[in-house]
Image (cartoon, helix red, strand yellow):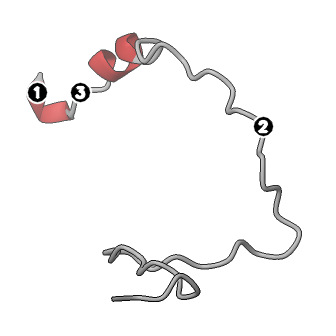
């Protein structure tokens, strides 16, 4: 049985955790909202390879 002075074992992680780089912001600002995802649809539909006639 472990004594009260010993810390509890850490759960095993599948990924390595590292310290953040010096000077990084620990609480970054939220990212700006992205586009709707449909603003390029007309351009993408118009860009067809020449062999698609």
The residue singled out by tag 3 in the image is 48
The residue lying toward the viewer, choosing from 9 and 16, is 9
Instruction: Find residue 25 and name its label.
Output: none
Instruction: Find residue 29 and name its label.
Output: 2
Image: 11 above or below 7? above
Image: 42 above or below 8? above
Which image quarter holds the N terminus? Answer: bottom left
Numbered label tally? 3
Q: Is residue 9 left or right of residue 29?
A: left
- Tell which residue pokes out farthest to the left in this image: 52
- Tell whether label 1 touches label 3 (CB within 8 Å): yes
Please report the residue visible at 41 percent of the width from the left and 81 percent of the height from the top: 9
Q: Residue 46 in the image: state x and y as whole percent.
A: 31, 17
Select label 2 or label 1 by which is in front: 2
Q: Is residue 21 left or right of residue 5?
A: right
Select label 3 or label 2 by which is in front: 2
Label 2 Cα neighbours within 10 Å, binned few <14 / some 14-19 / many ≥20: few
Q: Is residue 6 left or right of residue 22?
A: left
Which image quarter holds the C terminus? Answer: top left
Q: Quadrant of residue 41?
A: top left
Please report the residue visible at 53 percent of the width from the left and 88 percent of the height from the top: 6
Element carrying mark 1 = helix
Q: Residue 7 in the image: state x and y as whole percent.
A: 53, 82
Q: Residue 33 in the image: state x and y as whole percent.
A: 62, 21
Q: CA distance from mark 3 to mark 2?
A: 39 Å
Image: 28 above or below 12? above
Element carrying mark 2 = loop
Instruction: Find residue 52 and name its label.
Output: 1
Disc with the residue nearer the chain's start (2 vs 1): 2
């Amino acid at each position: 049985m472990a004594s009260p002075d010993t810390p509890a074992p850490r759960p095993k992680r599948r990924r390595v955790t590292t310290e953040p780089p010096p000077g990084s912001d620990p609480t970054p600002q939220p990212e700006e909202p992205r586009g709707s995802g449909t603003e390029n649809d007309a351009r993408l539909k118009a860009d067809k390879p020449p062999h698609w006639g």
